[in-house]
Amino acid sequence: MVGSEMLKILVQRQFPVDKVRVFASERSVGKQVPYNGQSLHVERLDESSFKDTQVVMFAAGADISLMYGPIAAEAGALVIDKSSAWRMKANVPLVVPEVNGGDIADNEGIIASPNCTTIPLTMILEPLRQRVGVERVIVSTYQAASGAGRPLANELQEQTEAIAAGKKPEVSVTTHQLAYNVIPGGWKPQQYGYNEEEMKLVNETRKILHDPELRIAATCVRVPVQVGHSESVFIETRDAIEPEDVRSLLEHAPGVMVEDDPAARDYPTPLDVAGRDEVFVGRIRKDLSAEKGIALWIVSDNLRKGAALNAVQIAEKAIEMGVIK
Ligand SMILES: NC(=O)c1ccc[n+]([C@@H]2O[C@H](COP(=O)([O-])OP(=O)(O)OC[C@H]3O[C@@H](n4cnc5c(N)ncnc54)[C@H](OP(=O)(O)O)[C@@H]3O)[C@@H](O)[C@H]2O)c1
């Protein structure tokens, strides 16, 4: 899903491409994928795939990135990795260009792109951090099926169609039926009752904001939405700030779009945000439980800004900084 989106975005942003090659597993060899009005032949990925290549974008899972990332970097390419494989490694910058684009300079051949919930969260936190300081963050996510890749996106569609036809939906990709349901788990369990997705959000946010002590906790939930991750966020700030000042601050934040008039039922929803590049924010209000706190609602397209777009923007920034020549 991310790979296909990446091909579209390269064209839409007129990324300066001479030649593009696409790779997948053995299963897909010989298939054609659309790119800029042409069809690209899918090739099998192996150790010799990276010869004479300047940029390699990986969107094939952590095991593939772990195995082939260093080989691509060794062959002289700049690796931009969408998986979680390299994100927390000390010598690998973890980059959201609008937030910490400068970190790209410290790369040793591999740059990581964060998790699809981390990217939008940091784009909202960074302007607040700069203006009033961020002390504590409590976030709950509402994550679309496509965030888990093509298999779950397809299963949600099939389950929805089965229910509409009065049939029993099949459940195979997750342990619970997703259609007509909400699943507060499905990721690998980790310490203290949290799971891998929740700890990615915590650790990656701290790394990107250069704030290893940031107090932050998350609950990640899968919802029956095809595209678009939403997040409910409570933020305690160091200095007080009024909701209207947060609104105008975020209106000027790069890549952020404020859509916030609840009285007129104007707030971002995944259905409206799917296909858009910006991170949308609404429901900006005072946190009634904190002396200096703000609550808000974030929605972004997990396949675009949450994944493919961020990777392409990293490559654009690397060109701008002279990292890719
Ligand atoms: N979906 C999101 O919103 C999102 C957001 C951020 C990050 N990510 C990350 O991006 C990566 C891809 O996610 P996705 O959602 O695009 O998954 P996906 O739709 O399941 O696609 C996975 C791709 O990896 C390929 N692949 C599998 N095994 C391979 C192998 N041995 N060699 C080469 N290619 C292989 C698959 O090829 P075949 O079709 O041949 O199997 C397929 O093209 C994951 O690391 C994911 O965590 C995803």
Image (tube, grey):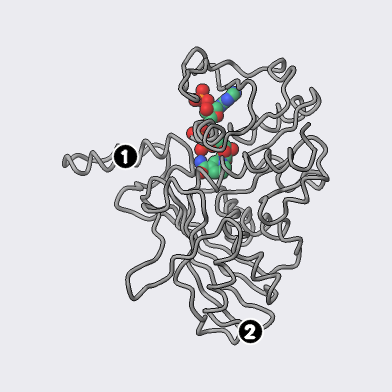
Above-or-below relation of 195 to 63: below
Residue 231 in view of the camera: no
Above-or-below relation of 77 to 135: above
Q: Farthest residue toward the left?
A: 166
Query: Which three-letter amino acid code belongs to the residue tagged 1?
Result: Gln
Residue 5 in view of the camera: yes
Q: Is residue 284 left or right of residue 195?
A: left
Where's residue 109, x and y in %? 79, 35
Q: Is residue 66 left or right of residue 33?
A: right
What is the spatial separation of the Cα atoms under label 2 and label 1, in whole angstroms?
A: 45 Å
Task: Tell me the quadrant of ligand 1.
Answer: top right
Above-or-below relation of 15 to 99: above
Q: Is residue 136 left or right of residue 302?
A: right
Where's residue 286, x and y in %? 51, 81
Quadrant in the picture for residue 311: top right
Label 1 residue SS:
helix
On residue 240, the disc is 2
Q: Nearer the viewer, mark 2 or mark 1?
A: 2
Q: Residue at x 67, y 54 (%)?
A: 204
On residue 157, the disc is 1
Where's residue 259, x and y in %? 44, 65
Is ligand 1 within 8 Å of the beta carbon of the residue shown at mark 2? Answer: no
Foreground pick, 186 / 164:
164
Q: Counting residues from the N terminus, which is met first, the one under dot 2 or under dot 1?
A: 1
